Image (cartoon, rainbow, N blue to C red):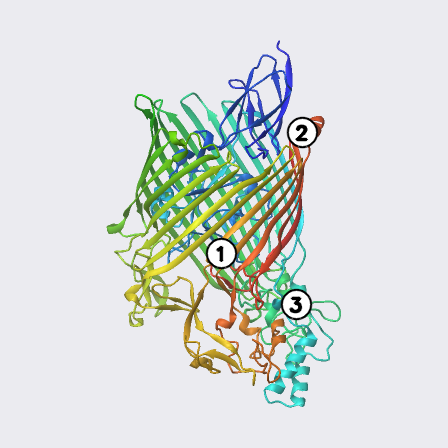
Amino acid sequence: MAQNRTITGKVTDEKGNGLSNASIFIRGRNIGTTSGTDGSFSLAIPSNVSTIVVSYVGLADKEVKVTNSSSYNITLEASSKNLQEVVVVGYGTQSKTNVTSSISTVKAAEIENRPYTSMDEELEGKVPGLQAPIATGQPGAFQEIRIRGIGSATAGADPLFVIDGMIVNSGDLTGLTTTANALAGINPNDIESITVLKDAQATSIYGSRGANGVIIITTKKGRPGKTKFRADVEIGYNKLADLPPNARFLNATEYLGLLREGVINAGGSQADADFFAQQYGEGTGVNTDWLHVITRTGRQQQYNLSASGGDTKNQFFISGGYFDQQATVMASDFKRYSFRTNFKHTASDKLNFTVNLTGSNAIQTTPNNGGAFSNPVGSLPFLRPTQNPYNADGSLNISTDPNDPTGFSGGNYNPLYIAKNDKYSTNTTLIQGSVGAEYAILKNLKFSSKFGIDYNTIDEYNFWNQFHGDGVGFGGLLQTNNSRIFNWIATNQFDYSSSFGNTGKIRLDAKLGYEVQKNKGYFVYSAGQGFPPTNQLFYSVNSATPVGAASSGSDYDFAGIYSSATVNYDGRYVLSGSFRRDGSSRFSNSNLYGNFWSAGGAWNINREKFFSNVSFISGLKLRGSYGTSGNAAIGDYQWRPTVHYGVPYGGQPGGSFDVVGNNNLTWETTRQGDIGLDAGFLKDRLSIVVDLYRRISDRLLFNNPLSGTTGFTSFIDNIGKIENKGFEIALNGTPIKTKDFSWNLSFNLSRNKNKIVTLPGGKDITSGNFILREGFDFQTFYVREWASVDPANGDPLWYVDGTHGATTNDYNTAQRQLFGSASPKYFGGLTSILNFKGFDLETDFIYNYGNLVTDSWINYAIDGTYPDLNKYAINLQRWQKPGDITNVPRYEFGSTNNSNAFSSRFLYKGDFIRLRNLTVGYNLSTSVTNRIGIGGLRFYVMGTNLWTKTYDKNLTIDPEQGTASASNLNVFYTKSITFGLNLTF
C-alpha cells in the first residue's frame, strides 16, 4: 500500500488575502480538504500523487505540482487572467469577460459575523448606486433599499430579491407590527455572495419586476473534500449610539427655569410663574432623566455551527444558528433560530439533483413609534423631568391625579409600566426550499428544472393593559393578526453553449426558460376588550366583548417566458441581449402581458494585439447597454372595480364600493441606458469601475385625482414620468503588499439626480411637507422659509416670498417655497483592511451628502407652544434680551406665534460620515493550528456605529433617517461592541 504524507500551505488571492473555504483535492479521488479562515490547509495524500487541484468560487482553478516540499503557497488568479471566472447573473452564471451589464458583488466575508439581523442592513456603503439608510434601531426592522434612485411614485420602489434562483417575498409582511422584515429570517452566515443587478441589461430578464433592480442571494454549498466543520460564537453588548448635543432634553432645573421665563414673557406676574412652576413639579425634588429611564445596555449574541464537504458525487452544506439582540430601548428585541441544508447529487455525467431547504423562527418585540403614547421614545418630548416613574415604595407610578405634578395625567403614561404590561410581539416562521434537476441532453445543451416554495406564517399579538395607558378606556384591548403567505415558483430552462468557426473563436451562450409563480395569502384578524382586573389574563378568550373579527385572502400570479444570448468573439468583442414576455394577474385581461428586452455590448480592449505590450494595464473593458424592465408592485386587485361586503344595512347584509378600478391599467415601464468602464492596473493592484446611466420610468402607477362627488378621491392610472441619472465609481487597490504586511482599500461614490418629467395635467401635487412638481426632485420640500429671529423683540421671522427680501412675523403670510430635497446628492463607502502576519484591522466608513432631514415631532419640544411638555436643549439658546442674535425665538408660555410650526427652520443638513464597522482580529498561525489538530482559529473584536461626524449644529436627530429623511420617534440606533471566535476543524 502506498504511504501517505501530509502537505500544508496557504491559499490566497492576488492581493495576498487568505481565501477561506477554498477546495484542495485530488482530481478523480475522494481525497481533499478545504482551507481555514486565513486560507491555510493541511492534506494527507498518497505518495504517488503528483498533482493537486485548488479551486475557489469566482477564481480560476489551479493545478499544483506536488514536489518533495511539504509546504505550498498557492495564489489563485483573477478574471483578467482567465476567461472562466464567473459571476452570478439572472438565471445562472456568466463568464466575467462576457458581462456587458452593471453588476456589483458582496462576498461572504463582508456580511458574516456582523451584529445585524438581516443581510440587507449590511449593504449600505458596499455597493455603488445602492442607497440603504437605516430608519430605526429596532432589531428585525424593514430595510428600505433604493437602487439608482426612486423610480416610482405610488407603486413599490424596493428591489426584487432572488435566493438561490427563487423569487421570494420581501419587505414588511405584517399587519399590526410597527416594522418587520421578511428577510430577517435568513441567517447572513449562510450566504456565499450577494449580487446586485443595476442596469436594464442585467434586470430585464426579470421582466415586469426588474425596474427597481434585482438582488440575488447565493447561499453556501458543499465542495468535494474532507468534511469541514465551522463554529462561530459572538457575544457583546449594545449601547445608545451618539446623539447630537441638541437632542438632549432638559433637566428639572432647566425646565422649570424656562417655564418661569415663559410665563413672564407671556405677560404673567411672578405669582403666576410661581403657580405654574409648582403645578408642573417645582418643590417635589424629582429630576427624571427619561432618556436614561427608557434605555438600557442590551445584550448581543449569536452562535452558528456548520458542516460542509462531500465527494465528486455528493456535496452538502448544513448549518444551524441562533441570534439574539436587544435594542438599547426597552421592549425592543429580536431572536432567531435558523437552519439550512443544501445538497447536490451527481448521478452521472449527464444528470445531477439539488435540494435546498432553510427554516427559521423569529420572535420580535417592537414598540410603537410616532406619537403613540405607548411609544417609549415618544415619551421623551411628552414627559416632564418632574414626573416620577416610581412611587416612594419603589413600585411603578401610575397616578393620574391631575393635582399630582409627579403623576401621569393628560394622556401621558409611565413608559416603564407600559413596557412591562403591554405586549407587542411578532412570531414569524419561514420555510424556503427548492428541488431541482439538471440533465445534459447534448454536450452543449442542458435542461434544468426547479420547483421552490417560500412559506411565511406571521402571528402578531398586541395587548394594551387595562390599568394604565391606551387600554384603560377599553378595559384592556387585544388585537391579533395571523397571516399565512404561501409562494411557489417553478422554472424550466434550456442552456446552450458552443464555439463556432474554424478556430473556435466565436462562442455562443444562450438560455430559454419558462417560469410561473403563484402567491396565496390568508389573513385572520381579531380584537377583544374588557379584560379581568389582572395582568395575567391577556388572551382573547378572557375578553368580555369581542369587537373585531375578520378573515381575508389575497392572491397573485406571474408567468413568463424569457431568453438571453451572448456572443463572444475571441474574448474581445461581446454582444448580448435578452427578452421576456410576462403575464400578471394584477392587470386586466386586455393588459395581462408585457414585453421587456435589453441589448448590450462590451469590448475587452486589453485582449487586442496592440495592447499586448502594455504591461501595467491588466484589464480594460468598455461596455454599454440599453433596455426595458417593469414594475408591478401594487395591490393584487387594484385594476378591478370592486365592492366589499360586511357592511350592515337596515339589519341586512350590505356592501359598498371599494375600488374604482381601471381596466386599462398596466405595468410601469423603465428604460435605462448604461455606459461603463472596467479597468485594472499593475496586475490588479488597482482597479476602477465607472458607470454612467440614465433611467426613465414611464407610465407611472399613479393615483390620479378624482372629484370627491364620486365618492372617491383618486384612482390608480398609468400617468407621469420620472428620470434618474447619475454616475457610480468604485475603486479597489492594494497600496502596500509585502510578505508580512498588506493594505487593501475599497472606495465607492454614487451621484444620482432625480427629476419628475411629467405629472397628471402638469399640475403640482402637494403631500404634507413635500411637493411634486415637474422638473424637480421627487422628494422636494415645500415649506415656508425661515428667515431669522428679530433681535429687537425675539419674534420669529419668515421670508414673505422666494426673493429673500421682505420678512414677516406672521406665519400665514409667508408663502411656501421649494426648499431642498430629502434625496442625497452623493453617498458611498470606504473600507480599509490592514493585514500584518496573523493580525488584521478593518474599518468601514459610510458617508452621505446633499440632502435635508427633519425631526417630525420637534414642534412639541421647541419653543413655548406646549409648555407642559419637556424641551430640547436647543431651547437654552433662545432670545432673552434686545440685541441677542440667535435662531431660537423668545420663549413664551402657551405661545400662539406659530414659531414651532414646520418651516425650513426644522430642515437640517443630512450630511454625515459614520464609522459603521471597526474590527480587530487575529488568526492563529498554521503551525499552531496544525499542532493542535484544527483547521483554523480566529479571534476578533468588532464595534459598530462607534463614531459619527455631522455638519449641522442645529441637529436634534441622527442624520440617517431612512429614504424619506424624516424621523418618527423610532427606536434609537445602537452602538455595539462584540467579541467573536471562528473555529474550523
Q: Looking at the image, which is closer to me, 747 or 240?
A: 747
Residue drawn at x 34%, y 49% is: 672
Q: Is residue 214 visible?
A: no
For mark 2, what is the residue? 926
Relative horizontal placement of residue 163, taking residue 670 as reference (left or right): right
- Locate residue 486, reporting x and y percent: 43, 45
Identify residue type, mark 3.
Answer: Trp
- Locate residue 964, reporting x and y percent: 47, 61
The label number, if any, that marks residue 481 in the structure image: 1
Q: CA distance from mark 3 to mark 1?
A: 32 Å
Asked if 798 appears above or below 113 in the picture, the reply is below
Q: Looking at the image, which is closer to me, 133 or 374?
A: 133
Q: Nearer the viewer, mark 2 or mark 1?
A: 2
Q: CA distance from mark 2 to mark 3?
A: 52 Å
- Locate residue 755, reporting x and y percent: 37, 60
Q: Is residue 907 visible?
A: yes
- Hey, which quadrant is residue 379 in on the image? bottom right
Q: Quadrant of the N terminus?
A: top right
For mark 3, what is the residue? 290
Q: Residue furthest left?
A: 590
The label number, if any, that marks residue 858 in the structure image: none
Q: Residue furthest top?
A: 1
Q: Secondary structure at mark 3?
A: helix
Relative horizontal placement of residue 420, taking residue 650 as reference (left or right): right
Say whether disc 2 or disc 3 marks the residue closer to the N-terminus.
3
Say whether disc 3 or disc 1 marks the residue closer to the N-terminus.
3
Asked if 921 appears above or below 879 in the picture, the reply is above
